[in-house]
Amino acid sequence: MTAPVFEWPIRVYWEDTDAGGIVFYANYLRFFERARTEWLRSLGLGQQALCDEHGGMFVVADVSLKYLKPARLDDRLRATVRLTEAGRASLAVHQQVWLDGPDGTTTLLCEGQVRAGWVSHRSLKTMRIPAAVLQLVGAA
């Protein structure tokens, strides 16, 4: 069974672009981060609540990106998140950024894999992801 895909809309602003009006490559990581945060929030897992209720937080441990086409100022994008693997101490997700064209077309701009480890929010030492969190992300 394939995990559901979460989608988060993004509009490209001046701050996202370089001098040529093209989205700066590192900003795709920011788009991915926003989508992962909103994915967790949609599951009832706010970042502060994870710290307060479970004593931990997710931190990015590994990223691999492939850039396919550029996004430009004022573009409407969609960042997606799909859980691909859940371990005892980390989650892996596949993420994409899509351009939603004014003519109804969609174009894949960037995709990648992100692994986030679960750590203590105090010591930053790796910990086991709580069963309740795994259940909410659909991994248990």
Image (cartoon, rainbow, N blue to C red):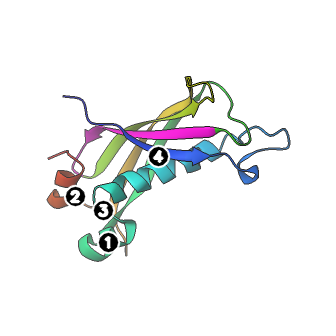
When the figure is inspected, residue 1 is found, relative to residue 37, above or below; the finding is above
Q: CA distance from mark 3 to mark 4?
A: 16 Å
User: Can you identify the residue that label 1 sits on?
Assistant: 49
Question: Which span is picked out in magenta?
Answer: 76-88
Q: Earlier in the sequence, mark 3 or mark 2?
A: 3
Image quarter in which the N terminus is found: top left
Name the residue at 84% across, 38% down: 20
Q: Nearer the viewer, mark 3 or mark 4?
A: 4
**Which of pointers 4 and 1 lies earlier in the amino acid sequence?**
4
Q: Earlier in the sequence, mark 3 or mark 4?
A: 4
* Mark 3 vs 1: CB contact within 8 A: yes
Query: Residue at label 2?
Result: 133
Q: Give left or right: position of 90 versus 20.
A: left
Q: Is residue 12 left or right of residue 46?
A: right
Identify residue for label 3.
Answer: 45
Please name the residue shown 41% across and 55% down the image. Answer: 38
- 74 drawn magenta: no
Q: The residue tagged with tag 4: helix, strand or loop?
A: strand
Question: Could you tell me what secondary structure mostly forms the magenta stretch?
Answer: strand
